[in-house]
Image (tube, rainbow, N blue to C red):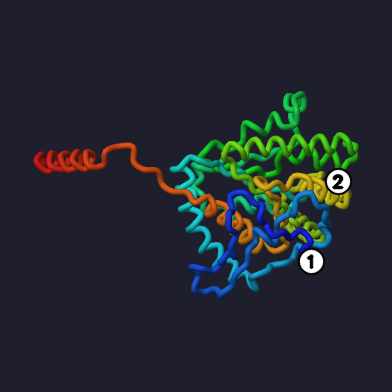
Amino acid sequence: MKNNIVTDCKSLEHDPSPKSLRLFASSPEAPEAEMDYRKLFFVDPGRRFQLKDQDPDASPGLDSKAEGEAALAAAGEQLTHLQRLLYAEKKHGLLIVLQGMDAAGKDGSIRRAFTAFHPLGVIATSFKVPTLEEADHDFLWRVHPHAPRLGSIAIFNRSHYEDFLVNRAHRRLDDKAAALRLEQIRDFETLLAQNGVVILKFFLHISKEEQLARFKKRLRDPESNWKIEESDYTERVYWDAYMSAYEEAMAATSLPGAPWYVIPADRKWFRDVALMQITLDALKALDMKFPKPTVDLADIERRYHTAMLEQENKS
């Protein structure tokens, strides 16, 4: 697999000393392996690249679905703990952006890769075609209210990039207008990052052949028929234009505090492992700690024992 998007990642915010990621540190069933997906799939900012050079069927560091399941289980326990730290410390929020062509697995990623998160601390938002009211405002107006508060996690299933991607692919944005949109996105994400939001942006990279295979599965499965939309096929015609728009957007907006990652997504199990491991590494790098108690623990201890004695005397 070619990896011309790889960088040394030294500029990544929240990662002062990138280290190789131990996928299987707590998984006895899995082989010893090290793979830093934050380095491997990172889009080098300000540099054009071609998605056709990235293998959507790759699974570096893992040889089988069984290994992937073991890695998911090991990482899941750590994610649960890190979410508790995130909520307790309340110094950061986490924004996860999922983008990709139809059937790339955005919904499935939320179910599988982020299932370890407690649902009360996560809000997932899907940005569809703008409503009439939304269309009367700037394209970021509908997005900002859904940014995560400190201590919480927001997942964007499609995002503020849709306005750029769709209009650029359909040639409704000329070069000047496209550059302005991307500048506004950079400013928006910089604002969030400067106010404590950790931003992780994932492009779920599937092949055109895999997309058609998933369309066939939806067509043959009565329980999946409801997912079928006419746009699945009308937008597929613009595949190359969408790839070009994604390349342009990612190269222009992969910032130190808002990196883009191109995730091979033909293999669903690998997609989920890569998403979870990158998220895990980003949260670990925050070096979060539980805050100190705001009460006098000794006094609370005395009150507890007093309450226990009163209860025992009544019984």
In this rendered view, identify the residue nearer to me: 9 or 312.
9
Q: Residue at x 65, y 61 (%)?
A: 37
Q: Is residue 92 above or below residue 82?
A: above
Which of the 4 quarters of the picture holds residue 64?
A: bottom right
User: Is residue 121 toward the left or the right of residue 276 in the image?
Assistant: left
User: Is residue 283 toward the left or the right of residue 2 in the image?
Assistant: left
Where's residue 303, x and y in %? 19, 38
In this rendered view, identify the residue nearer to me: 285 or 224.
285
Q: Is residue 43 above or below residue 298?
A: below
Label 1 belongs to which residue?
Answer: 2
| Kind of residue sitting beneath label 1 | Lys
Q: Secondary structure at mark 1?
A: loop
The tag on residue 234 is 2
Image quarter hosting the N terminus: bottom right
| Kind of residue sitting beneath label 2 | Thr
Where's residue 242, x and y in %? 84, 48
In this rendered view, identify the residue nearer to me: 107 or 307.
307
Which mark's residue is nearer the viewer, 1 or 2?
1
Q: Residue at x 36, y 43 (%)?
A: 292
Q: Is residue 226 visible?
A: no
Which of the 4 quarters of the picture holds residue 112?
A: bottom right
For this orientation, the residue located farthest to the left is: 313
Where's residue 236, x and y in %? 85, 50
The tag on residue 109 is none
Q: Secondary structure at mark 2?
A: helix
How packed mark 1 is, by other alpha carbons closer than 10 Å (few <14, some 14-19, many 20 or more), is: few
Q: Residue at x 68, y 68 (%)?
A: 60
Which of the 4 quarters of the picture holds residue 168?
A: top right
Q: Is residue 88 above or below residue 60?
A: above
User: Is residue 301 toward the left or the right of residue 198 in the image?
Assistant: left
